[in-house]
Image (cartoon, rainbow, N blue to C red):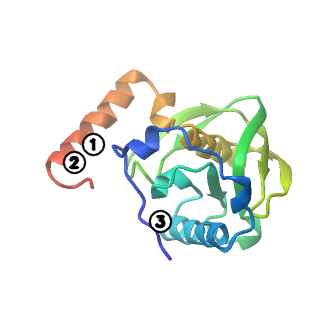
Amino acid sequence: MRLRIVKYGDPVLETPCEPVPEGEFGTPELRSLVSDMFETMYAASGVGLAAPQVGISRRLTVIDCTGGEDRSAKVVLVNPTILSGEGEQVGEEGCLSIPGFRENVARPSTVRVRAFTVDGEEQELESEELLARVICHECDHLDGVLFLEHISRFKREWIKRKIRNLKKRGEWD
């Protein structure tokens, strides 16, 4: 089932998320939410989606850097913690919750993250390049941080002004 993606301006996007409780691991509800998040992300042509982007303040994200072309590339991170990041890459980022806006953002070129699977098994994942970028972007969402915080104040204010104008015209829900 496709979920509604909330847009910039919704307070859930700028609020740190609560961990997924241990008792929810492996439940049909959590499995269904993960499945719905992947379906929603693919329908929106995204490569990552965090639970707060669908209005759920939980530390859960789904990622597929192939955009659905290789379903074996699916990554689910429950209660993730970034353990380390090295190097630097600068590249264009967008966000499904801030559609139509893209800016260059500096991120680590390699990232190591610890998280749980849907079944509650602890896992560590080493990533680089695009996957490292997406993990950082999605983990930021779980901390209530948007990619706008990683760009210059001038660009951030320009985007916010554009969004205010879209809201006034009823083109931003």
Left or right: where 5 falls relative to 71: left
How packed mark 2 is, by other alpha carbons closer than 10 Å (few <14, some 14-19, many 20 or more), is: few
Q: For numbered disc 3, what is the local secondary structure?
A: loop
Whether label 3 touches label 2, CB < 8 Å: no
Comparing 98 with 77, the one in front is: 77
Whether label 2 touches label 1, CB < 8 Å: yes
x and y, in percent, of residue 118 in the image: 74, 63
- Does the rendering let one see residue 102? no
Comparing 79 with 145, the one in front is: 79
How packed mark 1 is, by other alpha carbons closer than 10 Å (few <14, some 14-19, many 20 or more), is: many
Three-letter amino acid code at the position of disc 2: Leu
x and y, in percent, of residue 48 in the image: 59, 55
Q: For numbered disc 2, what is the local secondary structure?
A: helix
Instruction: State the quadrant of the C terminus.
Output: bottom left
The quarter holding residue 129 reads: top right
The quarter holding residue 69 reads: bottom right
- Tell me how far mark 3 sits from mark 2, CA to CA: 20 Å
- Tell me how far mark 2 sits from mark 1, CA to CA: 5 Å
Residue occupying image coordinates x 55% and y 34%: 105
Residue occupying image coordinates x 32% and y 28%: 157
Give the residue number, with chain letter if any, for mark 3.
44
Label number found at residue 166: 2
How packed mark 3 is, by other alpha carbons closer than 10 Å (few <14, some 14-19, many 20 or more), is: some
Residue 43 lies, with reference to residue 145, above or below; the image says below
